[in-house]
Image (cartoon, helix red, strand yellow):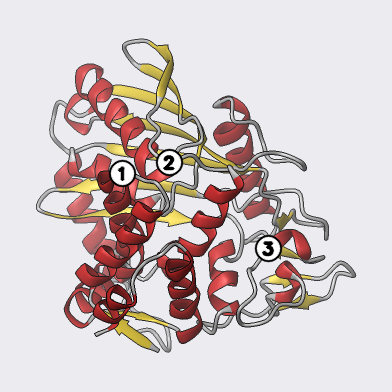
Amino acid sequence: MVIIQAEKLIDFVAEVFVRAESSEAEARRIASYLTTANLTGHDSHGVIRVPVYIRWKEEGAVVPNQSIAMVVDTPALAVVDGRFGYGQTVAPEAVRIGIEKCKASGLAAVALRNSGHIGRVGDWAEMAAAAGLVSIHFVNAAGSILVAPFGGVERRLSTAPFCVGIPRDGLSPIVLDFATSIVAEGKVLVASRGGKTLPSGALIAADGTLSEDPAQLYGPYTPDSPRIHDHGTGAIRAFGEHKGSGLALICELLGGSLTGTGATGPNRRFANGMFAIYVDPQRIDPEHLFDGDVARYVKYFKDSKTAGGCDEVLIPGDPEARTRAERSKNGVPLPDDTWAAIVTTARELGVSERAVQTAAA
């Protein structure tokens, strides 16, 4: 395991993306969002993605230095096209539009189509919450077919994330953010590179056998080989049996079909679609019940007697806040295989050995 301080990691990853033709501003933005994912404990959406992003860029699947194009613009609704730019560039542009429209009218919806990988969806819910807004996000990944629906063994779904953000007065927001699969694809990637092992039965083989072996998704691999999910014959399972499978379907139809990205399918260019709804509590709650009642109910919720083996009842966002505090202080832990893959990519792009050593020092 390698431990790297967050600012050093941001500097190093930013240099990688500058070498890959992103502007300095975009490179630092990508690096900051990826590192933030690691800081919150979502390693699957963190810097482990660097080699994948660079491969996508070299394949032409993602385009550096893009900005959104407005397709539909009404007082309460926008449809924006990310033009296959990095999600860390085009997603915050789309969220800013949603915030501005919601502040003006109290309610807004934004459909983002054709975005590069938007990373941890919780970032966008946190961005809206910082502006005092509730937000709901339905996301799909066109061209990414990883998940078997309930009752099936063949891949038919992307990991189709769902996210809700709720601001709290004087406290960090409540952010519910999860893939509708048992694990995100990035968690399979982490496991394949020496990180945390997968939960029991997270994957399913073509014959219906449950598995925790990442080779079901990627096919046979070596420590140094790329992880390409098209090479595997198995699938990730939808969480929660029919309930998770049903929610995944809704994310495909709203995040994909409704936005214009399209629901996932074979022979598609990779793109994230996100349909986001924004609500201003100040406008919907003229009697100002919201903040106080959120505080009351969260306390009531957390005061439940704990079950055996549990120290306390947590709410969404609690684990992330604690991990962020610990890793901000002590550094970001990366499995040796993960760091080696990032360094290999950096060297291939011409990042200096001195930069490598400085990051890891």
Measure how far apart labels 3 and 1 are at the Cα level: 27 Å
Q: Is disc 3 surrounded by few (<14), some (14 to 19) or many (20+) residues within 10 Å?
A: few
Question: Which residue: 63% across, 33% down?
Answer: 253
Q: Nearer the viewer, mark 3 or mark 1?
A: 1
Closest to the camera, between mark 3 and mark 2, is 2
| Outermost residue to the top | 74
Quarter of the figure with residue 192: bottom right
SS of the residue under disc 1: loop
Please indicate, yes or no, whether residue 44 appears anywhere in the rendered image.
no
Image side of residue 256 versus residue 337, left or right = right
Which residue does the numbered mark 2 point to in the structure image? 64
Which sits earlier in the primary sequence, circle 3 or circle 1?
Answer: 1
User: Relative to residue 348, is residue 63 depicted above or below?
Assistant: above
Q: Residue at 32% of width from left, 45% of height from top?
A: 125
Label 3 residue SS: loop
Q: Position of residue 286 (x, y in %)?
A: 15, 26
Q: Position of residue 42 (x, y in %)?
A: 40, 67
Residue to which mark 1 is pinned = 23
Which part of the image, by quadrant, shows the N terminus? Answer: bottom left
Q: Position of residue 277 (x, y in %)?
A: 39, 31
Callouts 3 and 2 close, C-beta under 8 Å:
no
CB-based contact (under 8 Å), mark 1 and mark 2: yes
Q: Looking at numbered disc 2 in the image, what kind of residue is underneath it?
A: Pro
Indicate which disc residue 228 carries: 3
- Image-based side of 321 in relation to 109, left or right: left
